[in-house]
Amino acid sequence: MTAIGGLNETPLHAALKRAVAPDGASFEVTIDGYVIDVVHEDLLIEVQTRNLGGMRDKLARLLEGHRVRLVLPVTQHAWIVKRPAGTRRRSPKRGHPMDVARELVAIPHLLGHPNLEIDVLLIHQDEIREHREGVAWRRKGWVTVDRKLVAIVGQHRIAGTHGLLTLLPGGLSEPFGSAEVAKAAGASRRSAQQLLYCLRSTAAIEPVDKIGNAVQYRRTAKP
């Protein structure tokens, strides 16, 4: 098994790689000119903790001839740890699986690809902050310097053209718009808009009406 550890790898990324790797997997294997986080038999696993758009070309190339599992974490709860004092408090922000859409909007043309599956991991994490004079004035000089995995508390696998439909809240009646989706899910309106954009890109939903400026949709098929 290849050892874990790469240049500039964050503790959060390294911990997630270990968590999602099947028994007997290899780490940091070069395939088609790209370094892959985890390889197990014919499956390539890529963990992306930020900026999915930055790996758009890599993902498109790999999908041409390989099964790829894209792992995307969503922080359900975070604890803010200040160093060196060591104080720890829970952030009031709460994540929702639908929040993954803010990354998926970077690859609408790849969603639904038959070789792609997406694992959304709900996680708890520590956000490590240090005080730096003259920066981050809105946070009074406190800067996030690291993120560490505390626990994985949920998993949501998405596959196939209509797989994203499983991110819609249950009991959602049709037609629906972003306001109805956000309210039913307890998520932000922005996340709902981004999810609907992704769903429309895969033709999993279609517009049927418009109320004011709000487009209303219906599902084109069941997941």
Image (cartoon, rainbow, N blue to C red):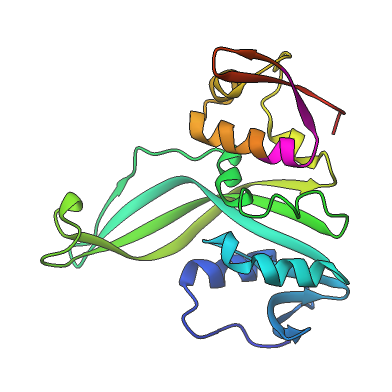
Task: Give the image location of residue 53, x and y in percent.
Answer: 59, 61
The image quarter in which residue 211 lies: top right
Identified at 78% across, 83% down, the residue is: 32
Task: Give the image location of residue 111, x and y in percent.
Answer: 76, 50
Task: Give the image location of residue 72, x and y in percent.
Answer: 62, 56
Identified at 15% across, 55% down, the residue is: 137
Specify whether 209 is left or right of 97: right
Q: In this view, does 73 lie above or below 205?
A: below
Q: How many labels does the image show?
A: 0
Q: Is residue 40 above or below residue 93?
A: below
Q: Does the magenta stretch include residue 80?
A: no
The image quarter in which residue 36 lies: bottom right
Instruction: State the residue lying farthest toward the left.
Output: 133
Task: Give the image location of residue 165, x and y in percent.
Answer: 75, 34
> Does residue 185 appear in the picture of this structure?
yes
Magenta segment, which residues?
A: 198-208
The image quarter in which residue 70 lies: bottom right
Specify whether 106 is left or right of 29: left
> Does residue 21 appear in the picture of this structure?
no
What quarter of the picture does the C terminus occupy?
Answer: top right
Q: Which of 219 and 121 is in front in this view?
A: 219
Specify whether 82 is left or right of 19: left
What quarter of the picture does the N terminus occupy?
Answer: bottom right
Q: Is residue 216 above or below residue 43?
A: above
Identified at 50% across, 34% down, the residue is: 190
